[in-house]
Image (cartoon, coloured by chain):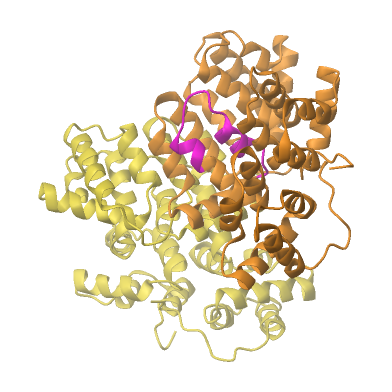
Chain colours: A yellow, B orange
């Protein structure tokens, strides 16, 4: 469930665009007004505001925002203002161009989205970058990571509930054998994880747990410093329990010496309309602090206000 | 350009469905009537006929056809009756399940279609087989072929005309180096061919030809019996000159001792609405016989009549 709260019967997109324009012109920018509008409109409505704004003022709303605001506040507002497919395309492009082995953003976009959402991001990628996502990922990665990431961002997984139990058993055995042999980048292991449907993989991982006594993600903790094993674990967690995965990303972002604003902003903007409420519940259980209070303590200013609004705090 | 000729102002789908039903009932089947209707209706109209037929008679038209006709005639009528995405899904499924190294059907579907058409085939694959195309291809292939075919069927290539000339030069060099070293299944070679846009690859292959004195497809003829090299060549030809590729498939199908009806039927049904006219022109130039005459000489009966109708012969 979402955290962000949309006003019922919002003003027309044209009125919202006009208010935003007012927030930009004159001496100083009215950040409160920007937050009060954008943080309380759905993705569909935000898209209409951008259209209305471009028609009325001959400039993309995102360009105006870029001129008026800056820093972490700018980042959270810009990511939020994009529609989900464009946002994913932008995040994936940044991750591919500045790729490093510990970066999990491509895995999130490939595995914690529906097949249709991933495909929409690939379409948005064409429109925005005049290239395909997979060609950029393939060109910027090497070795085992390329073997894993290129199929992950290219797959169009079947989404029905049909599961083949015999296959789940035989593929659980293959996975166990490869992990036992520490053959983490084995072709068969990668084939199974990058092509099977999420329902089929859940059945396979359940069988793995039953048959071999440990969850597969636990068996992938042998070497916590190995980035490739960590990438495999992130893949499996984004497929089987994205909410737990995102709770951990937020927890590490907040607990860091100096908050990791990049990660915090990414998770809040990509999940606020999806499952942020569940992520918050898991966060509270795990940390004994409500997520909004943790964010409140760890951030400040307009950035803080925008995050809290997206997290659904009543007064934000 | 297409060869197949559609009647202007065709009868309503319901009338066509009724006529087809008449062709099935009673003593014997009226094959001429089936051909006269189906071979002269567009894909969109054929889809409406199927809907109208199912509504009126409670049975899928394809099931009725399967009961009434058989052999090569059945195959050509059934493939033609399907809409293009479903037809590609069916052909790809057969090719994946009965895959062998000399089978080029997956390459045709992956490379001689637009990005949108390949994606539509992948969607149709989900609906029909409750699995993804890429998971079946990955599960039924091994080794170098898997390394090539899985990305080929998964890619969503950028389709704009934007070309990076510097990249074309550097990647032409990589391709030439790998081919000279006979490293045909090299990761970089496969990456380039399976992810770059068709416009970019054309620029790369042009540069290859200019810089190294031979077209790349010629440099891939070193060992004509090697199925993997043949697969690479087919991939490049389906990307750069699908019409020439299909002319050759038809030529070999007809020149065989005993026609290869499978290949002939596949090419005619998949290209009649697209570029069969151009394929026929290349055929005439290469063989000094018009394609329809060659097909006329090599086939017989209702199968022959259906093929000739799809090839646009006036009296068919």
Residue toward you, A15 or A254: A15
Looking at the image, residue B303 sits to the left or right of residue A301; the answer is: right
Looking at the image, residue B204 sits to the left or right of residue A233; the answer is: right
Residue B109 forms part of the magenta stretch: yes
Q: Is residue A275 above or below residue B188?
A: below
Residue toward you, A135 or B38: B38
Residue toward you, A16 or B296: B296
Residue lying at the far bottom of the rendered structure: A9
Residue B182 forms part of the magenta stretch: no
Q: Is residue B307 above or below residue B212?
A: below
Looking at the image, residue B278 sits to the left or right of residue A45; the answer is: right
Can residue A119 be spotted in the picture? yes
Count of numbered tags: 0
Can residue A97 be spotted in the picture? no
Residue B225: give x, y in percent of width and height.
54, 11
Residue A102: give x, y in percent of width and height.
35, 44
In the figure, residue A239 lies in which quadrant? bottom left
Quarter of the image with the C terminus of chain B is top right
Q: Residue at x 65, y 18 (%)?
A: B256
Q: Give, as a single range, the part of the protein colored magenta.
A: B93-114
Q: Residue at x 32, y 65 (%)?
A: A243
In the figure, residue B1 lies in which quadrant? top right
Looking at the image, residue A159 sits to the left or right of residue A59; the answer is: left
Residue A105: give x, y in percent of width and height.
42, 51
């Amino acid at each position: 469930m979402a955290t962000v709260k949309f006003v019922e019967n919002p003003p027309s997109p044209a009125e919202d665009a006009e208010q935003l324009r007012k927030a930009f012109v004159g001496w100083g920018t009215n950040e409160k007004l920007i937050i009060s509008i954008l943080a309380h409109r759905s993705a569909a409505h935000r898209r209409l505001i951008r259209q209305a704004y471009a028609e009325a003022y001959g400039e993309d709303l995102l360009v105006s925002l870029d001129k008026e605001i800056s820093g972490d506040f700018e980042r959270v507002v810009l990511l939020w203002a994009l529609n989900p497919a464009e946002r994913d395309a932008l995040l994936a492009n940044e991750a591919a161009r500045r790729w490093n082995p510990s970066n999990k953003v491509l895995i999130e976009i490939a595995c914690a989205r529906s097949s249709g959402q991933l495909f929409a991001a690939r379409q948005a990628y064409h429109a925005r970058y005049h290239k395909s996502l997979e060609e950029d990922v393939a060109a910027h990665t090497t070795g085992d990571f390329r073997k894993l990431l290129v199929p992950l961002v290219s797959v169009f997984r079947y989404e029905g509930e049909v599961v083949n139990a015999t296959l789940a058993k035989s593929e659980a055995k293959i996975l166990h054998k490869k992990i036992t042999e520490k053959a983490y980048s084995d072709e068969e292991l990668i084939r199974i994880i990058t092509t099977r449907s999420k329902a089929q993989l859940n059945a396979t991982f359940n069988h793995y747990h039953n048959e071999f006594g440990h969850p597969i993600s636990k068996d992938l903790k042998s070497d916590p410093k190995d980035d490739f094993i960590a990438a495999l674990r992130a893949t499996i967690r984004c497929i089987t329990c994205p909410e737990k995965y995102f709770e951990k990303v937020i927890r590490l972002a907040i607990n860091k010496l100096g908050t990791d604003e990049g990660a915090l902003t990414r998770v809040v903007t990509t999940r606020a309309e999806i499952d942020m409420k569940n992520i918050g519940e898991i966060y509270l259980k795990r940390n004994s602090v409500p997520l909004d209070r943790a964010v409140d303590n760890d951030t400040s200013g307009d950035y803080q206000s925008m995050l809290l609004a997206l997290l659904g705090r009543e007064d934000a």
